[in-house]
């Protein structure tokens, strides 16, 4: 099988697996009229559509640097943890410190 159809099919399968819980969550929120989410459920779905594309692409990019699957999975988790959680936390702390204006 050629490379482009293989990766396209794999991506579509992963994206479909990502979308299933997203839409199930949207249906659940709509069914029980959960106020915290139901007002912005369309924005949630649109955001998740973009997030799924980005996270799957990043996963493939990181995995392409490794020959062994176990090492790729370990690095993938570490890199996505740092980029997805720790980096935004550091940015927020720096921004909060830069905008902090104590009243003297």
Image: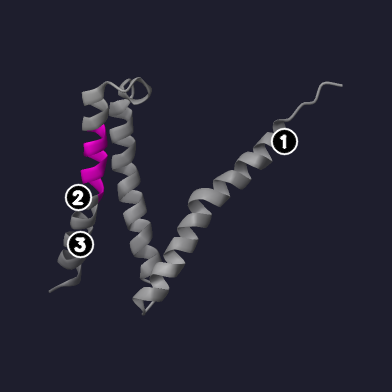
Residue under numbered circle 2: 16
Quick check: 78 above or below 85? below
Q: Nearer the viewer, residue 22 or 45?
A: 22
Quick check: 46 above or below 19? above
**Mark 3 Cα-neighbour bin, 10 Å: few <14, some 14–19, many ≥20:** few
Q: Secondary structure at mark 2?
A: helix
Q: Residue at x 82, y 21 (%)?
A: 103
Residue extending furthest toward the left = 1
Instruction: Report, in whole angstroms, how far the alpha carbon at label 3 lies from the one at label 1.
Output: 44 Å
Q: Is residue 83 visible?
A: yes
Q: Which quadrant of the figure has residue 72?
A: bottom left
Residue 47 placed where, x, y %? 34, 37
Magenta stretch: includes residue 22: yes
Q: Residue at x 52, y 49 (%)?
A: 85
Q: Residue at x 12, y 74 (%)?
A: 1
Q: Which mark is residue 10?
A: 3
- Mark closest to the chain's N terminus, 3 or 2: 3
Q: Which mark is residue 98?
A: 1
Indicate left or right for 13 with 53 as reference.
left
Span of residues in magenta: 18-26
């Amino acid at each position: 099988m050629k490379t482009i159809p293989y990766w396209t099919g794999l991506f579509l399968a992963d994206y479909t697996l990502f979308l299933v819980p997203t839409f199930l969550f949207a249906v659940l929120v709509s069914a029980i009229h959960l106020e915290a989410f139901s007002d912005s459920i369309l924005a949630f779905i649109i955001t998740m559509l973009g997030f799924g594309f980005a996270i799957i692409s990043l996963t493939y990019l990181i995995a392409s640097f490794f020959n062994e699957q176990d090492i790729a999975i370990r690095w993938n988790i570490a890199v996505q943890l740092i980029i997805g959680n720790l980096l935004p936390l550091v940015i927020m702390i720096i921004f909060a410190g830069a905008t902090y204006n104590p009243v003297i």
